Image (cartoon, rainbow, N blue to C red):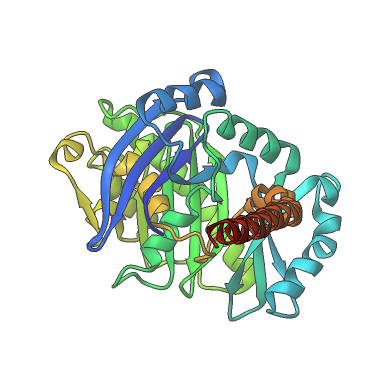
Amino acid sequence: MHGNITGIDISTEHITAVRTASGLKGRRILACARVPMADGSLEDALRSLAGSMDLRNDTCLVTVPEAHVSFRNVPMPFRDGRKIRQALPFEMENMLPSPVEDLLIDFIATDHHAESGVLAALVRKEFISNYLVALQSIGIDPEVLEVRGTSLTSWILNQAGTPENILVLEIGAKRYSLILCLNGRISLIRSFISVSVPSPENPEDMDSFFRSLCIAVQNTVHAFASRTGMPDRPEKIYFTGEGARDPISGDLLSRFLDIPAEPIDVSQDKKVRMEENIARDWSPALMNGALSLALRNTGKEGGFNLRRDEFGTEGRYQSIRKAIPKFALFLFLILSFLVADMVIDYHLLKKEYRTLDQEIT
């Protein structure tokens, strides 16, 4: 992808945007911004973002908050993507709380030893419609609508030295999510509401918060492993988010889960360059999601894209395609008139020359 590419990471609490420019040596970070989602108003937060960063001519990739997405692990008897997309709504119809016609569904393949299947993401079509209207009201027409956390996880899996079985934690102030990867593929996504907000000034508060978080993570991973027959101990934890900015976060995660934990910093990617004025305001824990999104290609890349079906980007060009025959006919008529005019002019000039030649003679 060429030109300016912006990743806009939207959670239930904040909107984070990282604007990048493509170059021969990789991607250069031009600007970054983070605005709060006051009272949950997406429109107000987007207007605030638009006031600090002009994104109208950029290629934008946007996340959908995981709180609005449901996930289902569905076994499938085949691996062909086209067949899976056709069969998936029928396979999931009995496990959905609302009619399948009201839902937008995308999936990624999970490669388990015990079973072959997919991880499906489901969002209400009404939500996607309102979401796109809010984005387009400030001039943002996203190429991709990704589920939060998946682009970041894909970036981690593509880094040298990353184990095949990992756990990615995004710890927000009010909500946290986990993504379990097995055999180098995203296999499980879950999101939870935080019972309490940790205070870095109070060690006991931090200890209690991470203890309850790790119990929920451990129970979720163990339940999934018991059902699928997979080993229930990831080799490593990668963590990020507002609730993980404290230096002791990694030690607490390692202690309670008994797994090595490492903070994520996407800005250390060798393909990324950062100006000094950006580096002063940069916070990896807050900007990782948006930057990994900006580095994502518009192709599948192991993640989701909810910009499909009636909300697909091809719909933007459908009216142009319909107008092409009319435009071609209009252009043909214009060219016909021009040619006719040239022919008439030629014959009139030729007649005039003959008259002049006769007079001269």
Q: Residue at x 29, y 38 (%)?
A: 31
Query: Is 80 placed above or below 140 here?
Result: below
> In the figure, is residue 287 to the left or right of 303?
left
Q: Across the whole image, how many numbered discs are drawn on residues?
A: 0
Location of the C terminus by quadrant is bottom right
Q: Could you say where residue 126 lies in the image, as x and y percent from the top left? A: 74, 37
Looking at the image, which residue is at 49% across and 19% down? 38
- For the residue pair 61 and 114, the one nearer the viewer reads as 61
Q: Among all residues in the image, which is located at the extreme left? A: 276
Q: Residue at x 62, y 51 (%)?
A: 313
Q: Nearer the viewer, residue 291 or 338?
A: 338
The one nearer the camera, 1 or 169, is: 1
Q: Position of residue 324 (x, y in %)?
A: 71, 55
* Any part of residue 3 in sight: yes
Give the quadrant of the N terminus.
bottom left
Quadrant of residue 41 in the image? top right
Q: Is residue 200 above or below residue 213?
A: above
The single residue placed furthest to the front in the displayed view is: 361
Query: Where's residue 234, x and y in %?
Result: 43, 66
Asked if residue 265 can be seen in this view, the reply is no
Residue 103: x percent and y percent? 77, 48
Check the image and report above or below for 310 versus 347: above
Please report the residue visible at 85 percent of the width from the left and 63 percent of the height from the top. Answer: 90
Q: Is residue 148 left or right of residue 67?
A: left
**Image check: 93 left or right of 124?**
right
